[in-house]
Amino acid sequence: MDIGPAQTEARRRFLRMLAASPLFASSHFFRSSLTNLLAANVVPEENAFAALDMLLHSDDVISSPDQALDVMDFEAAARKVLPPAHFGYLATGVDDDGTVRANREGYSHIQIRPRRLVDVEKIDMSVRLLGTTWSSPIVICPVSSQKAFHPDGEIAVARAARAKDHLQILATAATSSVEEVTAARGTPVWQQLYPTNVWEVGRSIVKRAEAAGCPAIVFTVDQQEGANRETLFRAQRADKRDCTACHKTAYTGYARGRPGGASGGFSGYVARKPMFDGLDVSKVTALRPIPMDWDFVKRLRDAVTVKLLLKGIVTREDAQLAVEHGMDGLIVSNHGGRAEETLRPTIESLPEVLDGVAGKIPVIVDGGVRHGTDIFKALALGATAVGIGRPQAWGLAAFGQPGVEAVLEILRRELRTIMRQAGTTSVAKITRSYVVTRPT
Ligand SMILES: Cc1cc2nc3c(=O)[nH]c(=O)nc-3n(C[C@H](O)[C@H](O)[C@H](O)COP(=O)(O)O)c2cc1C
């Protein structure tokens, strides 16, 4: 059958749409092949269809950590091994996931100004954070329920953190206890805190973490009830497995962001998490305090004997209040786009938060950090360190501890490369003059 010019154009448009589709997000190689073929107008459309055919029947997902060229390669590998609901839990933002994408895109509005003719033989990536020196500014953020990604969960992450010397922040809703993780890490980790609506429960978690040697508590303040995690809810619908086989306390998934749903309830949910072992959780109805306000922060400040940080601050006003309330540090974060759909990247919130703290306390930023250049940009804007959430879990899901190690190694290598290219031999030398911000 002969195909006329109108049909050829229609097919070409269809192929272009496919090449841009998130359906093929995991297939970097074939996606770019298809795009290139389409861009080169001289190539017959049959070739584009052949590429599409290869794409549909191909599997260019990495099968070992050493094949990864960047940390995103681990996302496709994680998607391949995880059940839909677990991958949905990891990937989800809220509403249309617009803030998840914005976190990434934010970095593309910042350009690097490399300096030439600097002796860059020796690169020092170390940073000092609340009295401890780390060999890089890359912090492992709290990601809950890591045994949903790999049987070794937080322990594998801790071993990778130990092997590569990274600060690890353990989630309250972790599937391993602070004692187990500290033992695997070799030195104490920081403890993230969801204090719950019952003061005694939150206080007991703090005291347990302090007893395990945690030098810092990180209170997450960006989670209210009812986050609309649409991608998760859709993935749960698509997952036909029997959840109760693993989620023993009648866990039937989230009912509009409420762990446990109708049958499990919060007490059922927290009862399965080791950090709640031995605590009376019968009155726990929320992971956050009620109300979650500055009076609660005051009360917590009085109860915590180690350093106390707030995670989830994104404005100058709250940063100033945090300093006034005696906080020791802040994490600029929108929970990886899982809190509310602001469409505002954390890298764009960073400057005003830094303004608010006026150099009095360290500021870490997370959200969408996927390359060494992202880390460089955040440091240039004034962050003390950066955090990674999903990339550690992609590496973990795909390959366990070696996957997490590879993710950390790639980010370190990329940071070293850009520091060398830009002529900055230490983190202190990565100043504001090394970046320009493109108007959005
Ligand atoms: C699956 C998942 C679980 C998370 N659990 C927690 C948590 O329990 N406590 C918390 O403070 N942040 C949690 N976060 C947010 C991360 O600590 C971090 O802020 C965010 O993932 C950074 O963005 P990124 O994933 O784009 O790197 C979680 C993130 C993900 C993806």
Image (spheres, grey):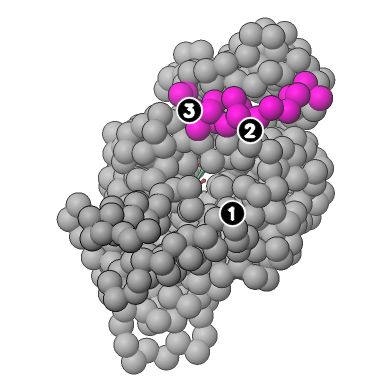
Q: Residue at x 76, y 15 (%)?
A: 250
Closer to the camera in the image, 430 or 295: 430
Q: Secondary structure at mark 1?
A: helix
Nearer-N-terminus badge (2/1) = 1
Q: Secondary structure at mark 3?
A: helix
Q: CA distance from mark 3 to mark 2?
A: 12 Å
User: Magenta region: which residues?
Assistant: 227-245
Q: Residue at x 63, y 36 (%)?
A: 84
What residue is disc 1 on? 76
Q: Amino acid at mark 3?
A: Glu
Nearer-N-terminus badge (3/2) = 2
What residue is disc 3 on? 230
Binning the other alpha carbons within 10 Å of mark 2 as few (below 14), some (14 to 19) or many (20 upward) gives many
Q: Residue at x 40, y 52 (%)?
A: 18
Q: Which label number is shown at residue 85?
A: 2
Q: CA distance from mark 3 to mark 1?
A: 20 Å
Closer to the camera in the image, 255 or 211: 255
Q: Which label number is shown at residue 375?
A: none
Q: Amino acid at mark 2?
A: Ala
Q: Is residue 289 magenta?
A: no
Nearer-N-terminus badge (3/1) = 1
